[in-house]
Amino acid sequence: MAYPQISQSLIATAALLACSATLAQSTLPAVTVTGRGADAPVSVGGFGETPIAKLPMQANVLSAERLQESGLSSLAGITALDASLSDAYNSNGYVSYLKIRGYDLDNRFNYRRDGLPINAETSLSLGNKSSLEVLKGSSGIQAGTSSPGGLVNLLVKRPTAKDLTVVGLSLSERGTAEASVDLSRRFGEGQAFGLRVNASAAQLKPEFYAAEGNRQLFALAGDWRVSPSTLLEAEVEWNHQSQPSLPGFSLLGDKLPDAKQIDPRLNLNNQSWSQPVVFNNQHASLRLTHKLNADWTAKAHLGLQRLKTDDRLAYAYGCTAADGTYYADRYCPDGTFDMYDFRSENERRNSDAMDLSLSGKFQTAGLNHQLNTGLLFSRFNSRFQRQAYNWAGTGKIDASAITVADPSLTDENTNRDERNTEFYLRDSVQLGADWQVWAGLRHTRLQRDSVRTDGSRATSYSQAFTTPWLGLGYHLNTQLLAYASWGEGVESEVTPNRKKYSAPGQALPALKSKQVEVGLKSGSNTVDWSVNWFDVQRPAWRDVSICAQADACLSRQADGTAHHQGLEAQADLKWGGGGLLASAMKLKARREGSAEASLNGLKPANVPENNLRLQARQNLAGVPGLQLQLGLVYEGPRAVLPDNSVAIPGWTRLDAGARYEQLVGKTLLTLRVGVDNLVDRRAWKESPFQFDHVYLYPLAPSTWRTSFEMSL
């Protein structure tokens, strides 16, 4: 179970780390690919290693170097690098939650690891990732079920073509310290074998009070070039994180508290009985690639994920005021709130996936095709124990109140099982010199079951559906592509199995979202840019009262749409010794077509409509090896409540940094320094409305960081 946490989002903040990816990994044969961001391959798009600039969709590749330059160690941080991304309930020390194009990503279905589905209800390590791919928009041909926002794909570091040794040490905040090593070697006859080790250990002392913790990572990746046509790759990863998480602030009665009057370092999870959230994760995969001939390649890819979580929190939720008024979705006007002892320990989430695929090119009727087809088998299960959710006393927003623990296991949890079989077919057809068509579909069959830990509220259902996608591109010249695309995505759920519903546990019709997108893309040695318009419509559900009784009187019904339209623009400008990465999004997100007229025209809570990211870099000619960096992040106002009666202002954050490189013999020394939130701006960063409760998260205070790296 996730717990409520919120940060209110204000407009405008810091650096976009856009498309500049360097993917160093073994292929057939082994090569190291470098180039402009627009030339970076984006495998999550579903059309092989086709560069971003040549696809009729929007995606971003965030390289490990870019993540390191920005001092990022969690997925939540990438919201500062792309204007299409924003926070969706991000708390220090906990699971990362993201929005793309205003839609929340589903941590169960919208994440991939080397293209295979994984569960992101955990803390995912970035230390052994070569890059992150962010696909924007409906993902029906890439995923069986998923939120229409897009997908995030984590690419694992693989053995490099040349030997690599990188040793690093970083310091930040109030004494956070991390040491890391990245080691790659090739050996054997003809260097047929490769091995890469990533290891790190960190002591966490963030700016937030009472939030100290630790994390460790060990990852091993190997490959064997069995023959010129066959490559076998294997990898394992173990990571651990233990750290208290931060509850959010909230409305004080009907009042939005002034963010300038709140200490952003405060941690309301500061009781003597508070315990850390502990994530223990294991991942492993095996991939066999065999080149059948010059045109066709077969691939088998198996992935395993084993997650264990101890989710614990002194949990602030609602309050009872001195006059007896109960505030269910916010704190009391005097700044007090009800504190609960929440503990859900030994949570187990296991995922397995097997992808069997065939890709190649052929010609028919004078047309050139690039085909990719395959079968994906996946299964997931979660196993929980009873949980504690007990009133512990009254808290205060100045974090001064003392409450009493009650770890009694008083509440049931829900176990879940899921099995999926997905068939996919994708084709890219060249129509003459200037026109190209992309088409794809995915047919999904799923079986889902759930039951409470006491055996009650069992549900079971199966569904099958097909999601198509179509794109068309026209090369206006060798550098400029105009495109249009249309596609569907799908989500699946059941009516909650509770007695207040008239049909508890009943499978609902699959929710099919639809997206239309048109855009222009261009790339050259001096600038890569794109601009596009998108329109996404996602069906909405609403609980409708059908009688006056207490039980069996709610019906969950389809009711209108969540309609998101927007303009996106991205640019990577390059000049001698410097450059500028920029992205912007203008979003109009509204509820439409509801039978309840008061809902129509409302904005979704916690969704900014104006986002801007800038990151400038410039080498100093007078100091060889020195680069100065300046970033800006801006986010517009967000609605706090579903009825739009309260909103948080927009905000702007400035970041600054520098990198100094010096070659000593054959050793490259790199020193990085940076300050996030340079002027210590105070604002509400985001305002998630979770579990029918308002949460407000403040913008993190001014934070310094530095790292030293030796590449031998």
Image (cartoon, rainbow, N blue to C red):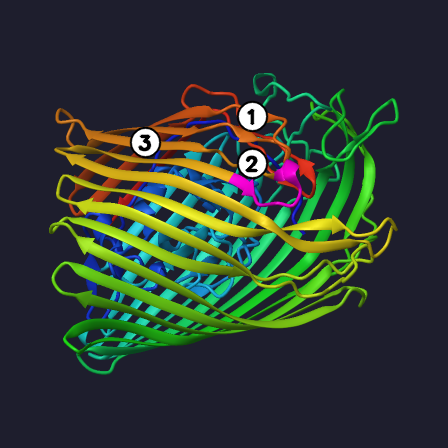
* Circle 1 residue: 648
Choose the circle earlier in sequence order: 3 or 2: 2
Mark 3 or mark 1, which is nearer to you?
1
**Marks 1,2: beta carbons within 8 A:** no
Q: Which residue is mark 3?
A: 614
Can you give x and y, in whole percent of width and height, for residue 176 in the image? 48, 36
**Disc 3 residue type (three-letter):** Leu
> In the displayed image of the protein, which residue is found farthest to the top?
261
Q: Is residue 618 on the magenta stretch?
A: no
Q: Secondary structure at mark 1?
A: strand
- Of residues 365 and 52, the one nearer the viewer is 365
Tell which circle, 1 or 2, labels the residue nearer the N-terminal end: 2
Name the amino acid, label 2: Gly
| Residue type (three-letter) at the residue carrying disc 1 | Ile
Numbered badge on residue 601: 2
Q: CA distance from mark 1 to mark 2?
A: 19 Å
Q: Secondary structure at mark 3?
A: strand
Q: Which quarter of the figure has residue 437?
A: bottom left
Q: Are marks 3 and 2 in contact (CB under 8 Å)?
A: no
Nearest the eye: 608 or 70: 608
Q: Judge left or right: residue 645 versus residue 652.
A: right
Label 1 Cα neighbours within 10 Å, binned few <14 / some 14-19 / many ≥20 = many
Q: Is residue 3 left or right of residue 576?
A: right
Distance between mark 3 and mark 1 Cα atoms: 22 Å
Residue 84 visible in this rendered orientation of the protein: no
Percent coordinates x, y for residue 486 in the rendering: 37, 57
Observer-nearest residue: 343 or 188? Answer: 343
In the displayed structure, 56 sits above or below 359; it is above
Kindly tell me whether residue 5 is visible in this rendering: yes
Region rendered in magenta:
590-599
Which residue occupies 30% across, 50% down? 166
Q: Earlier in the sequence, mark 3 or mark 1?
A: 3
